[in-house]
Image (spheres, rainbow, N blue to C red):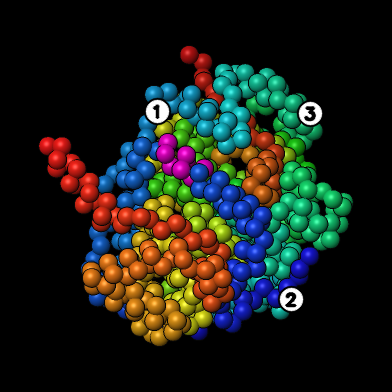
């Protein structure tokens, strides 16, 4: 088994290069594709039973758009209410500050053993590494996250972190890391093994860190959704609870939770709601609650008019499950914490040069936009980025030239028709060695389709003539 | 330092939205899906999320629970529902949350049940050892039939948030599908969740 030394992503990320290894294993690719599509179908069934699903999406998008337009006000209202409930609220400008705040809270209390429930924000900030570097043991308690943590890997999906692994691999891992018997691959037996291991860690933890799914400005509380109950155990046992949230997690009113909780689990896994949707208002009896509100680039996105809608995201992962590219290239090929269509529009804000290939890892089929519960126009955002990256000269010359030539042809009818007829004559005669040449990125894994005898235009004209005669 | 960061974040966010056209908060109230038979739908939803729903008379609570092998066999039973003879864990004897780790069965009152997803609203009030809810091997929730609602919008209309430090919608037992999408019941929390819907004497 591979144990990469560090979870850190490489400096420069070319999606096609990183996808190559995943794509090379055809069997695994098919399996991955099917696993994700299974979840997408569950999502379709779960949303289909809600007659007002489309209205619900529109309402959610409206609430989020409003909230984003007054984000600072809502955060202040939340801070005041949360403080009145006995919580301590901290603000962090970036990942470093977030990590420092969390570490100081732990260090000041002499804490060395921490349990964490799933949080994309702390993953994005690299919190685990920061704390581990300071000698603090951090145990991810979500089963999927614990699996990838034991493999020293980043999650490959935001909702199902270990979706890329087969049960046999997890069996081997548990044998090595948890001392389980060899050759166990039954998910029930493996989960039971993890249950024992995680309960030990939970009972021994001195602090619990959670993410935040929704923070309510009106009440000063927040909601954390899990299926395993790990966020609940991780905060009920230790005295100290630290909740980390991005600035965009806020919603105005308690009743808005009804809208978002109905959408979240159905979109994510096809469940009607997660097993536990826990509402935290203030610290537990005899305990301490700290809430860390993090910007880390979000205000920059908020300031970009055409891109700000991406901050409406509730992190359900539906866009990944439906994406034909994500399903066939795996989460690790994106090289960022949030993969898939959403990650591809978020990552270039941080470092456009580093993540320039991600907006091109899309067919622009629009399926991500169709399933998004908060109506983010993801495929439009991907297209916008392509233009922006091109203008910033961050797109490889080959691709830029090809786009310019195509653009020139497509606006000239005569050129388009001429090239079409040449292609129909030429393509069937093209030798395979040339069509599938390694320099031709598009041809390598494709058989050329048979060239049609007639063009669509010819067919259309003919139909019109015959239907005209019939009259 | 921390105050400076607070101001910096809030100022950045205000600057980012300064030129933005105000977006109104959608005020339209939402009624949501309604079911012809709210009790039947609730029972169906509980079953779908891996739980079990039983209808019982108020007076027959314990005898109904005794039909569950896990309850009948339980040695340590913690109950927040009064009148259960088998309840033998005194709250006073639990000093730290971790002392609740060896509870076999936990019975909690539910404030309301939601038909669309089988969720039951459970509130921590005056009892700090909520760890028991999640550490117990098995769990039962008791909800009066008149407290069933159709959907989440209705649920939030009835809930008073903020008054309770901790409250949660419990929808079925603890579960995971993290290993090859195979659903496994009993991930970290209770291995079973039985919802008793009770009807008072007519």
Please determine whether, in this image, residue B25 is positioned above or below residue A339.
above
Mark 3 in CB contact with mark 2 (< 8 angstroms): no
Q: Which type of secondary structure does the marked residue at label 2 adopt?
A: loop
Please determine whether, in this image, residue B35 is positioned above or below residue A59.
above
Is A110 in front, or is A293? A293
Same chain for the residues under marks 1 and 3 in the image: yes
Residue at the spot x=32%, y=51% of the render? A58
Which is closer to the viewer, label 1 or label 3?
1
| Residue that badge 2 annotates | A5
Same chain for the residues under marks 3 and 2 in the image: no
Overall secondary structure of the magenta stretch?
helix
| The magenta segment | A42-49
- Give left or right: position of A321 versus A75: right
Cα distance between the residues tagged 1 and 3: 37 Å
| Residue that badge 3 annotates | B73
Q: Residues within 10 Å of mark 2 (few under 14, many from 20)?
A: few
């Amino acid at each position: 088994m591979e144990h990469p030394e560090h979870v850190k992503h490489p400096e420069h990320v070319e999606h096609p290069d990183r996808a190559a290894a995943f794509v090379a294993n055809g069997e695994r690719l098919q399996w991955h594709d099917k696993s994700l599509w299974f979840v997408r179908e569950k999502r379709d069934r779960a949303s289909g039973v809600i007659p007002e699903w489309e209205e619900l999406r529109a309402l959610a998008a409206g609430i989020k758009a409003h909230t984003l337009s007054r984000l600072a006000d809502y955060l202040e209202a939340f801070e005041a209410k949360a403080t009145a409930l006995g919580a301590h609220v901290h603000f962090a400008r970036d990942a470093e500050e977030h990590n420092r705040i969390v570490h100081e809270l732990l260090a000041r209390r002499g804490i060395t053993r921490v349990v964490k429930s799933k949080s994309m924000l702390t993953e994005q900030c690299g919190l685990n590494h920061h704390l581990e570097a300071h000698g603090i043991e951090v145990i991810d308690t979500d089963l999927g996250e614990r699996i990838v943590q034991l493999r020293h890997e980043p999650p490959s999906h935001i909702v199902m972190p270990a979706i890329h692994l087969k049960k046999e691999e997890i069996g081997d891992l548990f044998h090595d890391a948890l001392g389980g018997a060899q050759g166990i691959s039954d998910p029930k037996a493996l989960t039971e093994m993890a249950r024992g291991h995680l309960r030990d860690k939970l009972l021994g933890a001195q602090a619990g860190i959670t993410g935040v799914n929704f923070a309510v400005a009106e009440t000063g509380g927040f909601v954390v959704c899990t299926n395993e109950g790990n966020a609940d155990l991780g905060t009920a046992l230790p005295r100290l609870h630290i909740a980390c949230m991005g600035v965009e997690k806020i919603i105005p009113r308690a009743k808005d939770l009804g809208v978002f909780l109905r959408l979240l689990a159905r979109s994510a896994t096809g469940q009607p709601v997660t097993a536990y949707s826990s509402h935290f208002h203030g610290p537990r009896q005899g305990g301490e609650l700290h809430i860390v509100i993090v910007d880390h680039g979000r205000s920059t996105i908020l300031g970009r008019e055409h891109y700000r809608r991406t901050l409406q995201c509730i992190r359900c992962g539906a866009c990944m499950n439906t994406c034909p590219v994500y399903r066939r290239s795996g989460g690790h090929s994106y090289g960022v914490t949030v993969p898939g269509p959403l990650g591809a529009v978020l990552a270039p804000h941080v470092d456009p040069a580093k993540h320039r290939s991600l907006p091109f890892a899309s067919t622009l089929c629009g399926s991500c936009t169709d399933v998004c519960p908060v109506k983010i126009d993801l495929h439009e955002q991907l297209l916008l980025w392509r233009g922006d990256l091109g203008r910033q000269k961050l797109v490889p010359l080959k691709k830029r030239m090809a786009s310019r030539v195509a653009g020139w042809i497509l606006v000239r009818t005569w050129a388009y028709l001429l090239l079409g007829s040449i292609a129909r004559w030429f393509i069937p005669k093209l030798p395979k060695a040339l069509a599938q040449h390694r320099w031709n990125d598009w041809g390598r894994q494709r058989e050329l389709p048979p060239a049609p005898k007639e063009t669509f235009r010819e067919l259309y004209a003919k139909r019109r003539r015959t239907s005209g005669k019939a009259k | 330092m921390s105050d400076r960061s607070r101001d910096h974040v809030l100022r950045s966010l205000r600057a980012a939205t300064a030129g933005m056209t105000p977006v109104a908060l959608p005020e339209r109230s939402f009624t949501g899906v309604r079911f012809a038979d709210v009790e039947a739908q609730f029972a169906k939803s509980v079953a779908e999320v891996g739980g079990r729903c039983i209808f019982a008379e108020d007076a027959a609570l314990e005898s109904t629970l005794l039909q569950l092998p896990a309850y009948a066999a339980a040695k340590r039973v913690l109950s927040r529902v009064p009148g259960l003879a088998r309840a033998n864990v005194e709250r006073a004897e639990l000093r730290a949350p971790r002392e609740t780790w060896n509870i076999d069965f936990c019975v909690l009152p539910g404030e309301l049940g939601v038909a669309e997803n089988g969720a039951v609203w459970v509130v921590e009030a005056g009892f700090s050892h909520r760890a028991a809810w999640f550490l117990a091997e098995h769990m039962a929730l008791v909800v009066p039939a008149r407290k069933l609602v159709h959907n989440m919008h209705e649920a939030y209309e009835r809930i008073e948030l903020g008054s309770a430090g901790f409250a949660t919608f419990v929808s079925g037992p603890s579960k995971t599908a993290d290993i090859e999408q195979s659903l496994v019941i009993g991930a970290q929390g209770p291995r079973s969740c039985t919802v008793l819907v009770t009807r008072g004497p007519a």
